[in-house]
Image (cartoon, helix red, strand yellow):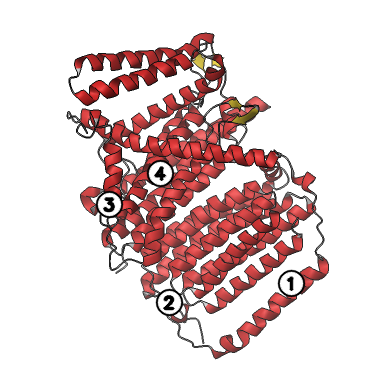
Amino acid sequence: MIPVSWYLILSAVLFVLGVAGFLIKRNVITVFMSIELMLNAVNLSFVAFGYMLGDYNAHIFVFFVMVVAAAEAAVGLAIIMLMYHNRKSLNVDDIELLKF
Amino acid sequence: MSPFQDFLVASLIKIALVLFVLLTALAYIVWIERKIAGRIQNRWGPTQTGPHGLLQPLADVIKFIFKEDPTPAQAELPTYFIAPLIALVLGLLSITVIPFGGIVTVAGHSTYLQISDLNVGILFILGVTSLGVYGIALAGWSSGSKYALLGGLRSSAQMISYELSLSFSVVGPLLVAGSLSLRDIVNAQSGYWFRVIPHWNCFPQAIAFITYLISAFAETNRVPFDLPECEGELVAGFHTEYSSMKFAMFFTAEYANMVTASCLATLLFMGGWLSPINSQYSRFVPVVVFFALALVLARFWLTRRRLIEKIVLPVFMGVCVLLGLLFLWPAFYTPAEGVFWFLAKVGFFLFLYIWVRWTLPRFRYDTLMEFGWKRLLPISIANLLITGFIVAWRAS
Amino acid sequence: MDAVLFFLFAGIALAGAINLIRESHPIYSALSLVAVMGALAGLYLMLGAEFIAVVQIIVYAGAIMVLFVFVLMLVNAAPEVKLDRSKMAKNVGPPLLTLLLVEIVAVLRGKYPTSDLVHPSLLSGDNTRQIGKLLFSKFLLPFEVTSILILVAIMGAVVLGKRRPDDSR
């Protein structure tokens, strides 16, 4: 049997990779994908905990995370499309109107 | 043997068998399609390769293998090669959870006529279908051609849109059966109303049945929804830049998807392997069918003059008579009768696909989207709502 | 057998996540994320969550990521250009990330030292049925709220995506 902590460590590594992608990547869509990666990592630890405790509430949590991620993707991608139409660029460094 | 080895051996045998039968059947569905297309358009279809053009699929395969396979200079390389593989694998994958019949017992081992009975079988099929977009979208994108890109874009939009109504119309039968396992869904359809009409979902769930069929046509990119190919405007859509075996993979995937959609329609709405006739004599139907087929072949044999037909037709006649006799043998007909009915129903749906393809014109792109979102989706949601109310009312 | 499967899926997930960062073309990043999601679905199956595994494939890989790929194809995204404006991110970032990773792993190791507290019996049976029952009894209110959230998201996407007649695009 695999110890549950392995799943949790895998989830931690994936989460950190997601954070790294979020900080490193310059394409706004890839940044968005890094957020999805972080959400997925958290989902993995939810499912692992649910398995450890024999609890279905964890599955429900994952379900809600997925729903929120879907809603987020719909609105986020619409915003990105608008941004592309206005700026003709997907680079986050080009979107600096609100930055000092 | 340990249970695990038992399972492994049984699964491998089933996979090999299903794959062999499926791929052969796919080749001959193409032959049947060309024959039917010919008849609908008042011509003969393939006649030259072999008797009645029966060797045409073989000739096609040989042509596909030996054709030159140019790679466009603009292509994104790894993706360009992987895209047809994705399409083919996903096309063949969903057949794994399709049950073909009841339990069969071979040499003391009893097993289901199904590669794997997942308890989330129907969701598995929906998942694989939803991944099918990648093959087409990536092919369109990686070809580096505007026609292919437009075809890929259209297909992703179309498949995302119609997947919704497909899923919603699948949920109706699920609610009625109260299970996600395809085997349970079929078993929930056993029985007859007034001892005549079979207890199939296509009667109480008629709206879901129709919306399922329409969305399945759109999901498999067949006429009248073949916008991704659309040879009138986009040359050949997403597979414009593909030829040789890579094109053959897309072609096989399309027909495999057709077979899966037909199997699913059979299982969800037409009672799967259950017999439509409420009588103990229903097992004689296959016998009569095969003997009638043998008689038709005998008539052909008497009238045809070509030497090859004089040789080949008696062989087919013999096979038909043998199958008819086998269905009189109790050890054979108990499992095989279910398979017979299942294949007959799947054949009906495949015929429907071909019939529609050579009868209806193509949708325009905006009407296609409007139809999917403004007509099909509300209808399927309304049907789901009503079904849910009735199921809840019955349960209380 | 279990260990082999775990390392297979974990390897795919890690390789996909690293490739997501390494790849400069967004479409390849998206594809590696799809691979990560597929591998995670496999891990969910091993953790006895077959419903979540299939929903992961349908919703994440089949809907959300298809949307990403669709948008990437629509805007015809080119490989990204690195402008290297922030020196700080380059110098301080990797050590901080390593620190974060070490911290999380240390806490996990401390709290759950290789023990296996699994109660498989509690998760056996009809996964989907149990989740459905919980969703429509204990979590009914959150469920309804998410449905409103989805509705709002749809309307937001439609409003954002709608072209205004006075736009000069």
What label does residue C105 carry, if any? 1
Amino acid carrying mark 2 in the image: Glu
Q: Residue at the spot x=38%, y=21% of the render?
A: B319
Side of B84 relative to C9 (left or right): left
What label does residue C80 carry, if any? 2
Question: Does mark 2 fall on the same chain as mark 1?
Answer: yes
Amino acid carrying mark 1 in the image: Val
Amino acid carrying mark 4 in the image: Glu
Question: Does mark 4 fall on the same chain as mark 2?
Answer: no
Element assignment for label 1: helix
Q: CA distance from mark 4 to mark 1?
A: 45 Å
The mark lying in front, picked from 2 and 3, is: 3
Q: Nearer the viewer, residue B231 or A22?
A: B231
Please provide percent x and percent y for residue C52: 63, 50
Element assignment for label 4: helix
Bin the neighbour count of mark 1 within 10 Å (Cα to Cα): few under 14, some 14-19, many 20 and up.
many
The residue to which callout 3 is attached is B66
Q: Residue at the spot x=37%, y=66% of the render?
A: B77
Q: Mark 1 belongs to which subunit?
A: C
Please provide percent x and percent y for residue B47: 20, 31
Q: Earlier in the sequence, mark 3 or mark 4?
A: 3
Question: Does mark 1 fall on the same chain as mark 3?
Answer: no
Element assignment for label 3: helix
